[in-house]
Image (cartoon, grey):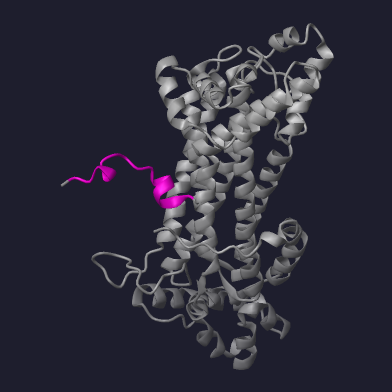
Amino acid sequence: MIDKKYSTYQNPLIDRYCSKDMSYIFSPQFKFSTWRKLWVALAEGEKELGINITDEQIEELKANIYNINFDEARKIEKEVRHDVMSHVKAYGLQCDSAKGIIHLGATSAYVGDNTDVIQMDEALKLIRIKLVNLINNLREFALKYKDVPTLGFTHFQAAQLTTVGKRATLWAQDLILDLEDINYRIDNMKLRGVKGTTGTQASFLSLFEGDHEKVKELNKLVCEKMGYKSSYAVSGQTYTRKLDYQVLSVLSGIAQSMHKMTNDIRLLQSLKEIEEPFEKNQIGSSAMAYKRNPMRSERIASLSKYIIAESISPALVQATQWLERSLDDSANKRLSIPQAFMAADAIIEIGINVTNGLVVYENMINKHINEELPFMATENILMEAVKRGGDRQELHEIIREYSMQAAYRVKQEGKDNNLIELIINDDSFKMSREEILSVMDPKNFIGRAPEQVVEFVKEYLDPAIEEFKEQIGMTIDLHV
């Protein structure tokens, strides 16, 4: 027996990945109640400027903002083939006295475009809170491990030492740049406003019998009633689709940062130095029972690729719009914008989960340091030996020969690195075992990494987090 519930495609962004809060912002309930709020704001503004609209009509409209008759709207749309008019008529069925003044002077883009802006704005604010929580997790991690030396890697080859905490600041710095982009975009978000069919406000000029100042004031009033300081100065029928590209570019930036961070975690997990959370009953592989795959980081990487690719859609839409508007943006926007936000919401939530439970294996880190540090320490040993009267050129040649022997022993014979033992046993260096080993302390090779962590946290992370300190402490349980 086939269960019909599972016989149609289910969007994994909703079923598996994104939060209910983000899903709600792009839900029909949120969308169409926002349309109704915009119709109320328009009616209120028109009434205040002298149009014959009563308080009773406005109260009737307000009483039904959230009481949306979806079935009626759907039935009407099948007949009229127009989504906005179907909801105008459906709203009118609930507001008998006000039905004649709903959408007065407006075009479809009045509710459609202004709602799109509001949805993106609300979604960015939700993303921001979660991003700040993720940054705070990295802040705590960086401070905890600021003094713990670890191999640095360039080209994924062992390089000079850094610290575990310093590496985390590199991840946090990318996310701080993303947070700055979000803040800028939120602070500068504008509505389309009340602009009319082709952006000329001709219908409203007619409504107010040629009074330009009232038309301008109506636009201002509606923006204020909806919580915005202003609208775009000019528009065609729609706001410029460049805004959609700018917003999704912010999400793409977050995806790039998250992908980079989790690539690093996956590499370090392969080295057994750091591990993302792995639950007691979690299965890493259906065949290899011993495996502990970095599933969370891989999911972030996968969804990040999707977001980066999705951000191209609004760029193509903006580039190919015709004159005052064409409708080849609509279907694209319905898909690209909500789904990019849902995927971005998911990767940040998973990132919070990962950074809440990162495990650091210091013994394994030290093992890797000890395998490579002898080569890195030779310059310091050389300088110290020269201070004691040694000949730099002779000692350099000795170190070069010993380094070749040790490298052969490690690579060809699979043995430990005995370079330091070779140097200790050579009287040419005029240094005791203790003196040479003291040079080998990994903390001698981390430079200002611990100080950089503290300075970065104080100058950049703390100010960014301070504004949202009441909303810090978020924990995330993954859906699957």
| 434 or 265, nearer to the observer | 265
Q: Position of residue 78 (x, y in %)?
A: 40, 20
For residue 89, side relative to residue 413 (left or right)? right
Task: Tell me the residue at 50%/64% (across/down).
Answer: 354
Magenta region includes residue 4: yes
Mark count:
0
For residue 74, side relative to residue 452 (left or right)? left
Task: Tell me the residue at 80%/17% (across/down).
Answer: 50
Magenta region includes residue 308: no
Quadrant in which the C terminus is drawn? bottom left
For residue 105, side relative to residue 305 (left or right)? right
- In this rendering, the answer to whether 241 lies above or below 380 is above
> Which residue extends farthest right?
213
Q: Position of residue 218 (x, y in %)?
A: 77, 21
Question: Is residue 155 among what the camera can see?
Answer: no
- In this rendering, the answer to whether 388 lies above or below 183 is below
Q: Position of residue 124 (x, y in %)?
A: 62, 43
Q: Quadrant of residue 181?
A: top right
- In this rendering, the answer to whether 303 lies above or below 144 is above
For residue 133, side relative to residue 47 (left or right)? left
Q: Which residues are magenta?
A: 2-18
| 88 or 311, nearer to the observer | 88
Q: Quadrant of residue 431?
A: bottom right
Q: Position of residue 64 (x, y in %)?
A: 59, 33
Q: Quadrant of residue 279?
A: bottom left
Question: Is residue 81 among what the camera can see?
Answer: yes
- In this rendering, the answer to whether 286 lies above or below 280 is above
Task: Tell me the residue at 76%/32% (across/down).
Answer: 224
